[in-house]
Amino acid sequence: MPKGVFKVGKSGNFLKIIKTICVFAGLIFGAGFASGQEHLTFFLRYGQVGILGIILAGLVIALCGWAVLSICVKEKITDYKGFMQSVFGRKLGGILDIVTGLFIFVIFSAMLAGAGALGQQALDLPFSAGAVILVALSLGVLVFDVRGIVEANTIITPILVAGALFLGIYAIFNTVEPTVAQSAQNINIWPLSASVYASYNMLTAIAVLSAMPAIVTNQKIARWGGLVGGGIISVIGVVFAIALLVNLPVVQDAQLPMLALGQSYSLIIARGYTVLLFLAIFTTAATNAFALTNWLASRTKFTKTQIKLIISALGVTVAHTGFSAMVSYGYTTFGFLGLFVVFAIILKGAKNLFSNGILRK
């Protein structure tokens, strides 16, 4: 991207930190998170202790985000391929690169499934209609390349945070149907579930975070962008978890639990959260479409226009697998594969931190 696209004055660092935080938080705040489906799948099946899992996942996401951005600044990395080779070497990095590319496609397809489910549940639209509308909007943002992704997240993420906190806090103090105590499943494995959740989220986030050299220009931006972005996800995650736990009978069988909760209160809240949920799905779909397009463009002879059309058609087809099924099985599978990636990145980031005095920069 040409230099100077994000020109800022004396407050340059602050504005770049805000943009980095918004992009990072927006990457995680997708359909699975905003709908509450990920909370049910990865945390709340373990009961109240699942809240500790959310805190652990948020910590891992924050540290890994900081590590990715810090490594990119230190080694002047400008794309995902260069990042993976820097951390894992050419051979292993190449293998993990393919795994991540496949998962980016899964996430993109899951967002289309989320849009289809949202259209069905909230507006009685055909499943394919919601998915196709999301494809069209995502491709529109990609016209502006990485700038479109950054600006979209900078505008939308604060709206998502405010709306999500409102519904979560409202639901905590306005219980629809009291939860009856239930036995939790395999309570001792909540740390593993939390780690899997963090790892699959970071697999796709790395592809975008490593392509932001024009914004993340120093270690201060990397540090605050990673830590605050991850912290925001932790806070909202805990609020959502409590809201869902105290209203479990209403949400436990819903494809979009937080929307089901909103619908139990009033039409205004339901419509408002429908818009919010669509924005969350939209930003994640557009970001992953951007990452996938660039990933394929650097590895095939197809033009970016051809790639966008191909992944759109395939994505809508795969989306018919169903949103909750993709979260339960697709996310979990790649999450286990990503555990090694995430912890290797954190270790390298820690090594850089202590060997080069990055904290003082």
Image (spheres, grey):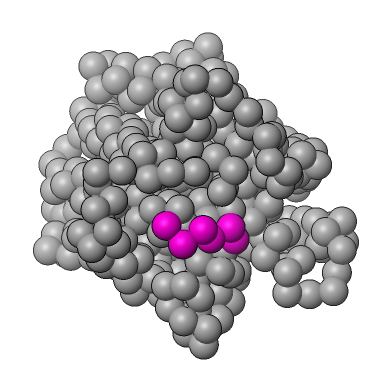
Where residue 162 sits, quadrant-wise, is top left
Q: Is residue 106 magenta?
A: no
Q: Can you give x and y, in whole percent of width and height, for residue 43 in the image?
A: 27, 51
- Main SS of residues in magenta: loop
Query: Could you tell me if residue 260 is visible in this image?
Result: no
Instruction: In this rendered view, identify the residue nearer to me: 188 or 183.
Output: 188
Is residue 242 positioned above or below 351 on the image?
A: above
Is residue 63 positioned above or below 297 on the image?
A: above
Q: Is residue 175 left or right of residue 13?
A: left
Q: Is residue 291 left or right of residue 223?
A: right
Image point (85%, 74%), residue name: 301
- Point out the stretch of residues depicted in magenta: 74-79
Image point (49%, 43%), residue name: 216
Q: Is residue 301 left or right of residue 47?
A: right
For the C terminus, give its image quadrant.
top left
Q: Is residue 76 magenta?
A: yes
Instruction: In this rendered view, identify the residue nearer to me: 136 or 351.
Output: 351
Image point (55%, 81%), residue name: 94
Q: Can you give x and y, in whole percent of width and height, for residue 68 in the image?
A: 41, 57
Instruction: In this rendered view, identify the residue nearer to me: 296 or 134.
Output: 296
Query: Could you tell me if residue 178 is visible in this image?
Result: yes
Instruction: In this rendered view, identify the residue nearer to me: 176 or 44.
Output: 44
Q: Can you give x and y, in whole percent of width and height, for residue 299 in the image?
A: 73, 74
Where residue 145 sits, quadrant-wise, is top right
Q: As drawn, which residue projects farthest toward the bottom?
A: 91
